[in-house]
Amino acid sequence: MDTNCGFEKYEGYVGNKEDFNGVIFYLREPNTEGNEAEEFWFKRIIIDKENYYKELEEAKCEKIETDKRIASKFENRFNEMLEQLGLTDKQLKDVAYCNVHSDSGENSVTNEYREKLTNAVNKLKIIVENMNRKELIVFTCKDIFNKLCDAWNDGKRNEDGLKYNNEKKCMHYFCCEIGDKKITVYEILHPSRSSCLQKN
């Protein structure tokens, strides 16, 4: 782990730290089919997508179409979130990406993730405290969102957050301050399993 910023080995700034745009995607764990993580997957699909796909093809990966579809859904859902909030100046190559449990994962949540969830608030707190930007936007899944909301905003949340096509209700969000940082946290559905977000 890089103790200077709170990120673990295969997570962090997607592009250059100096170009960070204040957006953090904070998810659960990588789907490595139970194996140890060996790369910063999200960075690869954003910065080095063509080579990533080429390596899948050269390895004759049986799951190549699945892997491509998941990569595309992550990119599309995240861009849709930014677009719906009017953040069209923000690019995914300039965001930060991290997981509560970053070492490994499976198709469904693991016991290791459930154990790490107790430290989810502290991990993100360390990360944001070490960032230079004073205004931050965090996108995260419901169980992590609830932990953050309880710890940072006494459980108070707004009900007019992000809107998905197949969901009747909006997702939640809240605003808070951590030290000198102003933070807005948005609840999201997991990008690999969610429908498109509504267009403005």
Image (spheres, grey):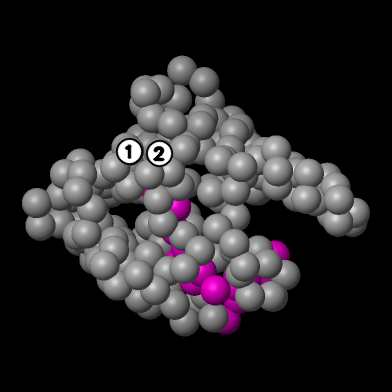
Tell me, for residue 141, which label it has, or none: none
Tell me, for residue 19, which label it has, or none: 1
The residue nearer to you, when weighing 146 against 107, is 107
Range shown magenta: 96-111
The residue nearer to you, when weighing 57 against 197, is 57
Answer with the quarter of the image where residue 129 lies: bottom left
Q: Say left or right for 179 vs 160.
A: left
- The answer to whether mark 1 and mark 2 are in CB contact below 8 A is yes
Identify the residue at horizontal 19%, vertical 48% (top origin).
Answer: 132
- For disc 1, the neighbor class at 10 Å (few under 14, some 14 to 19, many from 20) is few
Helix, strand or loop at label 1? It is helix
Answer with the quarter of the image where residue 121 lies: bottom left
Identify the residue at horizontal 47%, vertical 37% (top origin).
Answer: 92
Q: Which residue is mark 2?
A: 94
Q: Say left or right for 21 vs 178.
A: right
The mark nearer the N terminus, 1 or 2, is 1
Answer with the quarter of the image where residue 62 lies: bottom right
Does residue 26 appear in this view? Answer: no
Q: Position of residue 159 (x, y in %)?
A: 34, 40
